[in-house]
Image (cartoon, rainbow, N blue to C red):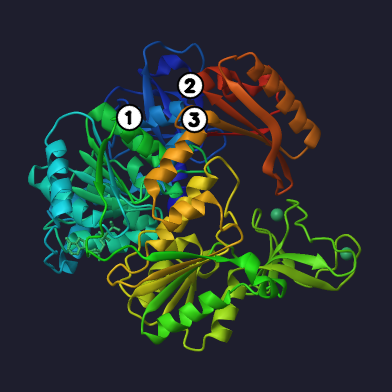
């Protein structure tokens, strides 16, 4: 008999509804992924409070764990089912419960979906083991993870602080010793030694018995970050991110619940872990991966960090070479303390950036060649000198589109009406939206012809060009298609760091915060081809991409070079990046945002409606439009087709709403979210909401 079946039998009495007279206590209970909370009864009030973990049975589902959201004072007039406290008698802290409610409220996301974001794995498997593990841990004053981590610590003496770093550290310490909310923006150019500064701050925090959460945007950055801190601190470091195994997550969670950890390093989701930090550091704070897109709640890690810090009194440190415009704006408004490091710690100057005008490379371009002769020579020279190069190409696959040789039609995905991308690696055509694969030799969907050609090169093609034309290149490619297995990013980075390879070719994954001392050349191919959905942050993203990628070059030695291939050499953003001029870029871009009413000057809400039937969708869109028109404090843009109007056979339409505060959106949309039926919006319509 499996464990689950046993459980089902044990809890079979949960199934029936009972008269409310049979119970002593009533609670609203939230179950992960069940949108609303439901009322259950308990036999006695022992072991129940808000946050308690209880066994319940919902609908026809198996018995599972839920969390007590509220104790209800009045006896309900309807029949209710029984809830039984878990044998672990575990309950979530008031802080945790308050955050759950806030996330659900602020991001307009049903409570059950919000809870699912907090629970690191299948909840039922998870707390099931809590009671057993707790006993085990009691016997063992050191947790298992601690021991493992402690063994790995090799003490290294860090370099002495530079004068600029000392000044910044001094101000951070001053802020650390204050009470209540403190926010800091550390604007330090790439290689200015921000991490060295965080080390000091963390060390100081531990000294005064404060807990620190260190956030990085990318799972692949956690090993590097852990190394840099563990070499410096006499303190076990805990790690939390979505790629840990269920077992690892559970162990870390247990340790956090026992309040053992004082330093936690993690990615976005670590902000939801049960860790009551006094200091939170967001490294590379501008990075878009701090934002959760799908599924809901579509939260921003930074907003959650600020919310917690305001509410519970904590220090927030944002660090970046290219701060998000919001953060920079708040710093200029003195809402954040602005600290800057404007020199590289190693006293090496920033690399020279040159543009290569691809319109002048006409002949090559016509032949579909991606690599300019100048970049090709630069790579050859760089490798001949025994150095390494990083090449960025932000487009997956081999060729962007497949054209029919007879009728000229582009081959589109049948589910999404989006051009199919040829992936040589998979010997297939791939839709980048719904991930459908098609055979390369499919006949033309328009005329049936079987002859075709490819157009628009992508990263796999660039890889071929470099390997074929630069014999000294030992190239490793890092993009989503070469990093599907757990740990593969770390493997690639390690191999490159140990100089097994001398060229790292990748998508924007290669730009993030890595510190490779051997890199003397960075090439950016196709800088203008936006990676994602066109939106008001496009310029900001391009500037960040250019600056961050450039920042990987020449971190330890002079003479590094950054070459940017572009079709628009006169684009002002290119100019700013060329001159490493963040401040002027930010000021200009903020002016544009103010004129065009975009954040940080207004709040933005994207509302997307989706349905399989176009008629049903448009009906819902018109009803929502009518509702929104009544709210004069909200500026409504749209409805328009979503950027990809049809994904996986579902049609999508989009509104963009602007208002002075998020609460105005909430007021306007409350009814549409909670009770779409009352607006006569079909239940088959999907509503997606995303703030800013
Ligand atoms: P950032 O995080 O700002 O990009 P890092 O902290 O990665 O910068 O530092 C960049 C490089 O400078 C690293 O190789 C680091 O070891 C070195 N470095 C940092 N601080 C110092 C210092 N005070 N003296 C010498 N080298 C330093
Ligand atoms: Zn055709
Ligand atoms: Zn598709």
Residue 556 in the figure: left or right of residue 160: right
Closer to us: 370 or 126: 370
* Residue 660: assigned label: 2
* Residue 333: assigned label: 1
| Residue 557 lies in quadrant | bottom left
Closer to us: 247 or 155: 155
Q: Is residue 50 above or below residue 573?
A: above
Give the residue at x 33% y 75%: 518
Q: CA distance from mark 3 to mark 2?
A: 13 Å
Residue 100 in the figure: left or right of residue 652: left
Beta carbon of the mark 2 residue lies under 8 A of ligand 1: no
Identity of the residue furthest to the bottom in this view: 471
Residue 255, visible in the rendered structure: yes
Closer to us: 178 or 430: 178
Q: Secondary structure at mark 1?
A: loop
Q: Secondary structure at mark 3?
A: helix
Residue 175 in the figure: left or right of residue 55: left
Question: Closer to the camera: disc 3 or disc 2?
Answer: 3
* Residue 40: assigned label: none
Residue 323, visible in the rendered structure: no
Earlier sequence position, callout 1 versus callout 3: 1
Q: On the rendering, which quadrant does ligand 2 occupy?
A: bottom right
| Residue 178 lies in quadrant | top left
Disc 3 target residue: 594
Mark 3 neighbour density, 10 Å: few (under 14) some (14–19) many (20 or more): few
Give the residue at x 49% y 27%: 602
Earlier sequence position, callout 3 versus callout 2: 3
Q: Secondary structure at mark 2?
A: loop
Give the residue at x 30% y 71%: 558
Residue 21 % position (x, y): 42, 14
Q: CA distance from mark 1 to mark 2?
A: 17 Å
């Amino acid at each position: 008999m499996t464990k689950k079946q046993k459980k089902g039998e044990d809890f079979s009495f949960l199934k029936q509804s009972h008269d409310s007279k049979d119970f002593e206590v009533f609670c609203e209970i939230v179950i992960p992924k069940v949108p609303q909370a439901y009322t259950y009864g308990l036999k006695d009030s022992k072991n129940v409070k808000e946050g308690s973990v209880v066994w319940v049975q919902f609908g026809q589902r198996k018995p599972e764990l839920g969390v007590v959201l509220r104790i209800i004072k009045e006896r309900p007039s309807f029949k209710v089912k029984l809830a039984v406290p878990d044998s672990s008698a575990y309950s979530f802290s008031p802080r945790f419960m308050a955050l759950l409610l806030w996330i659900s409220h602020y991001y307009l996301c049903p409570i059950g979906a919000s809870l699912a974001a907090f629970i690191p794995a299948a909840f039922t498997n998870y707390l099931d083991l809590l009671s057993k593990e707790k006993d085990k841990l009691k016997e063992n004053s050191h947790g298992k993870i601690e021991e493992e981590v402690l063994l790995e610590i090799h003490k290294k003496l860090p370099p002495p602080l530079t004068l600029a770093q000392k000044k910044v550290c001094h101000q951070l310490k001053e802020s650390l010793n204050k009470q209540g909310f403190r926010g800091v923006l550390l604007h330090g150019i790439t290689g200015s030694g921000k991490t060295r500064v965080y080390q000091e701050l963390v060390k100081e925090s531990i000294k005064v018995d404060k807990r620190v959460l260190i956030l990085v945007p990318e799972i692949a950055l956690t090993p590097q970050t852990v190394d840099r801190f563990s070499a410096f601190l006499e303190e076990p470091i805990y790690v939390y991110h979505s790629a840990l195994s269920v077992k690892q997550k559970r162990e870390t969670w247990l340790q956090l619940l026992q309040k053992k950890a004082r330093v936690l390093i993690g990615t976005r989701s670590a902000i939801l872990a049960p860790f009551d930090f006094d200091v939170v550091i967001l490294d590379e704070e501008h990075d878009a991966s701090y934002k959760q897109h799908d599924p809901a709640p579509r939260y921003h890690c930074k907003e959650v960090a600020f919310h917690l810090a305001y509410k519970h009194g904590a220090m927030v440190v944002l660090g970046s070479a290219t701060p998000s415009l919001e953060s920079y704006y708040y710093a200029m408004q003195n809402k954040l303390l602005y600290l800057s490091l404007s020199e590289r710690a190693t006293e090496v100057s920033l690399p020279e950036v040159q543009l290569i005008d691809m319109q002048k490379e006409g002949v090559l371009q016509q032949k579909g060649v991606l690599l300019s002769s100048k970049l090709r020579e630069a790579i050859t020279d760089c490798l001949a000198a025994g150095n390494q190069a990083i090449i960025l190409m932000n487009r997956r696959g081999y060729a962007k589109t497949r054209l029919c040789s007879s009728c000229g039609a582009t081959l589109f995905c049948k589910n999404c009406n989006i051009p199919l991308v040829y992936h040589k690696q998979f010997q297939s055509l791939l839709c980048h939206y719904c991930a459908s694969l098609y055979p390369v030799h499919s006949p033309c969907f328009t005329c049936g012809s079987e002859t075709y050609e490819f157009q628009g090169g992508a990263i796999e093609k660039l890889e071929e060009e470099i390997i074929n034309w630069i014999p000294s290149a030992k190239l490793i490619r890092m993009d989503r298609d070469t990093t599907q297995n757990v740990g593969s990013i770390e493997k690639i980075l390690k191999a490159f760091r140990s100089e097994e390879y001398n060229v790292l070719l990748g998508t924007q994954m290669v730009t993030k915060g890595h510190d490779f001392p051997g890199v003397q050349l960075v090439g950016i191919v196709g800088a203008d081809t936006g990676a994602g959905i066109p939106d008001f942050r496009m310029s900001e993203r391009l500037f960040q991409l250019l600056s961050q990628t450039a920042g990987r070059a020449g971190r330890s030695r002079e003479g590094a070079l950054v070459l940017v291939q572009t079709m628009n050499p006169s684009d002002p953003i290119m100019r700013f990046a060329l001159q490493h001029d963040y401040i002027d870029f930010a000021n200009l871009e903020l002016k544009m945002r103010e004129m065009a009413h975009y954040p940080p000057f207004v709040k933005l809400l994207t509302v997307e409606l989706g349905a399989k039937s176009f008629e049903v969708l448009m009906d819902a869109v018109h009803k929502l439009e009518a509702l929104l028109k009544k709210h004069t404090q909200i500026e409504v843009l749209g409805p328009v087709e979503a950027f990809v109007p049809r994904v996986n056979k579902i049609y999508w339409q989009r509104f963009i709403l602007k208002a002075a505060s998020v609460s105005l959106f909430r007021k306007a949309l409350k009814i549409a979210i909670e009770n779409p039926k009352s607006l006569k919006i079909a239940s088959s319509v999907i509503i997606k909401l995303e703030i800013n």
